[in-house]
Structures are given as C-alpha cells and as structure tokens.
Image (cartoon, rainbow, N blue to C red):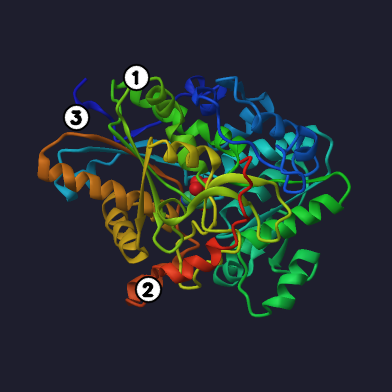
Amino acid sequence: MSYEKIPYKTFLAESETPETWFNLKAFMRDGHEPFLNPATGKPSTEEELETVFCKECVKQELNCKDAEIEIPGGIKSFYRTFRPSPLVRAYFLEKVLDTPAQIYYKFEGSNTSGSHKLNSAVAQAYYAKQQGLTSITTETGAGQWGTALSMAAAFYGLELDVFMVKASARQKPYRKEVIRTFGARVAESPSDTTEAGRKILREYPETGGSLGCAISEAVEKAIKTPKCKYVLGSVLDHVLLHQSVIGVESKTALDKYGVYPDIIIGCAGGGSNLGGLIAPYMAERLQGKNKTEFIAVEPASCPSLTRGKYAYDYCDSAKITPLAKMYTLGCGFTPSPDHAGGLRYHGMSPIISKLYDGGYIRAVAAEQTKVFGAAVKFAKCEGILPAPESSHAIYAAIEEALKCRLTGEKKVILFGLTGTGYFDLAAYKQYNDGTLTDYIPSEKDLEKSLNSIPAQKKTQ
Ligand SMILES: *Cc1c(COP(=O)(O)O)cnc(C)c1O
C-alpha cells in the first residue's frame, strides 16, 4: 500500500482491540534481577509483596512465563470508554520538517485524565475491588496518575488517598481539584499525617517534596490501614504490562498498512509508557526478527539512564519499599524546583533498565527549553497541546526526522504522545515569557544523591 493511502488518523474497531496484555518479560532471557527484601537481602517473596500491593498485581509482577495475559471483562468494559486510542500519521509535522521520514504517534491524551496513566489505573483499581479491599493509596507528582486513579477508584467504588508532591500541588492547583471532584482525598506531601512525612518535615521544613517521599507516605498509610493497599503508577512490571495496550494497538494498526517502525521513541519517567509502547516490537527484536532502534528520552535535569548507576536501590526516599535493580540517581534525589516537565522519578523500570544495560535501548537526555521548543512546533502543525513529558519524545522524533532530511532515508518513526498539557500552562507561560531555564546537575550535585544508593552486597 502506498504511504499516501495511510489515513491521518487510524482508530481500530472495538473488535480489533486487544483481548490480552503483552508480557515482554516472557521474551527476556532470565527476566531481570528480583526485588530484594532490604532486611534479609533475599528476593522478596510473593507474601511480602502482598503486604503492600494487590494480590493479582503481585502475580503479574512475578510472571516471567506467559507472553499474553488476559484482560478481564470488567477492565475491558472501562477501556471501552476511552480506548482504542488513535494512531496518527503526522503528515503536517513531516511537511514542516521537510523530511522524507514517516512519522507516526500514538495519542494517549484523549481521555479526561489526559494521559496514558488511566490504562494501568483501571486495571489496578479493578483488582483491588476484586480482592475485597475498600481503599487504596498512592502518590502523584505532576498529577496525571492521581487523576487517572481517582477516575478508576470512582468507577469501581473505592476510597482513595493521594499524596501529591507539594511543589506540584502548588504549581497545579486545578489538578488537585479534578482529583477531589472524582472523590479522592489529596494530601500535600510531605504531610503531617504519616511518620515518613513528619520525619522529612522535621529535617527539611521548606522542602517541596519528591516522588520518593510521597511514595513512602502512601505505602505507610496502606500498610497501617485495614483492607487497603498501595498502588503505583509506573516503574513496576505489572504497570508496564497494563501499558502494553499502547504497543499492541499501535502494531495492529500499523500491520494493517504493512508499516514497520525503524525507530520507536518514548519519553521515560519511570518507564511505563515506553515499556508498553515498545513491548511487541522489542519482543521481536529479542527474537532477532527486526533491527528497530528504541530510544528513551529523559530530562537532562533528572537523567537516571544517562547519568545514573545500575544498582539495587530503594523505590522511595524513606527506604521502606523493597530494593529494585535499576538505573537510579539515588533514592535521596530531589529534582530541581526549576524543572517544569515531569519525569522526576529517581529510578527507572527494572525492565527498561535491563534492556538499556543490554544495549537494546538508546537513551537521550534533553534540556527543557529544547523540549518546549519541540512542543510548540508540534502544537502549531498537529493541533494538539502536548504534555511536557510527551514533548521529550516529540523532541527526539524531530531530531531523528531531521537526520533523515540530511541522509534522505525514509525511516518510519513511531513515538508515544502520552498526554496533553492543559495543566502545564504555568510552564508554557514561562516558556512564552522566555523565563524557562535549563538545569543540568553538575557531577557534584549528582554525587550527593548517588551516595544515597545503599551499599551493594556481594551476592548481588
Ligand atoms: C507520567 C507520565 C509520563 C511518564 O511516565 P512513564 O511511566 O515513564 O510513562 C509521561 N507522559 C505523561 C503524560 C505522563 O503523565
């Protein structure tokens, strides 16, 4: 089929949407290093993980065997309200860039939460309800995850406590109101409602908080509340599993036209949208069936892949979670307050970390002024106001398309457009006013947080 025949937007029919999630781990030899219980230094057991997380999510977390995992009917019916998401051929961007490359993006921002996060929020709330729980807790940084989970909690009838990073809550007061409107309680983190929060407030009374700290508070609250578990919106394997609907839908749509991506690009905070988008294509790569290039784009101000260490570290700053082997800046990392673009987590998904370490993924760190420049260029021709997080992927896609202009190569580029930026207008204002600045941590800045990575035991 000639490329001109490919429609601007492709929506799959309901009958073409995935019946199963795609478990990339089933294709990774030996999976990745297990979570460790920091007290014993031994791999965390299913029972230990179940003290914090829902049973079914733990099962999925530890499943390295099944390539496909059925999406329950109760989840599919909610998916129907906002999926399938469109796959768009960026004809207008291609024209502006004057590139022979073909650019596609999978747009996950057309639901009310405004991002891909809803894909996992639905699944995790559903499993919590199935297990007979009455409430769940979580953290949120930029607020998309808290919003998505508040929608899912409302749909399935669960109470929800959201610990929102204080700096973000102040930057985005209306995000907080959306979450409250869907019926969840929001506490600014660090809060005085948990031991972890009070401890950090005593040490750093002025702190704007961090995701690591908010996670500590949410986990503590879940452990201390009956019939309550903690849910996490990124990083973990089961979250990447739920996000595989992005990749599976993309592949189904592109296969219809006989199109196969040469380059797949995703922004990387904790790694969930990237892991979901690349899943079916990375599986083929691991089987030697393609030469597709995979690119993770992270902020230069929070560069866990490009400047972090591949080591066992805590997932939170109060060190109450299990240890995960991942690329990390250290669980004591606090992002610069000048950083506007999300993607602030100190660590990276163990799956993405393992693939990056194995040379299957390339990582790019982008400064935020360049990222916003790419966002504006994209918005003007494609008509979508992108989230700053998503704009990291746009930035790299444009760079790759411009390389093709030089070489004349007609590469197929697919990137994940994870969300919209309507709650990021304070950051857009700074960009428009010319006051947005770039912060690249010095070696010395990073050294301090890298030193918060616990000593690695010999057995690891
Ligand atoms: C949370 C978020 C991200 C980053 O999270 P990942 O787990 O790395 O996917 C990217 N884009 C948007 C819009 C988000 O809300």
Give the structural element (helix, strand or loop) at label 1.
loop
**Marks 3 and 1, how far apart at CA:** 27 Å
Amino acid type, label 1: Lys
Name the residue carrying label 2.
Answer: 436
Q: Residue 227 bears which disc, if any?
A: none
Q: Is residue 423 left or right of residue 407?
A: right
Q: Which mark is residue 289?
A: 1
Q: Cβ–Cβ below 8 Å for labels 2 and 1?
A: no
The residue at the point 45 percent across, 41 percent down is 274
Q: Which residue is mark 3?
A: 4
Q: Is residue 218 above or below residue 61?
A: below
From the top left corner, tell me how far across and down residue 316 is, in percent: 65, 56
Give the percent coordinates (x, y) of residue 363: 37, 47
Question: From this viewpoint, which residue is outermost toward the right?
Answer: 226
Question: Quick one: quadrant of the C terminus?
Answer: top right
Residue at 18% of width from left, 50% of height from top? Answer: 96
Q: Earlier in the sequence, mark 3 or mark 2?
A: 3
The residue at label 3 has a CB less than 8 Å from ligand 1: no
Q: Quadrant of residue 177?
A: bottom right
| In-image side of 314 versus 450 (left or right) | right
Tell me the quadrant of the picture where the N terminus can be found: top left
Camera-side residue: 382 or 273?
Answer: 273
Mark 3: amino acid: Glu
Which amino acid type is shown beneath numbered disc 2? Leu
Q: Of tags 2 and 1, which is closer to the observer?
A: 1
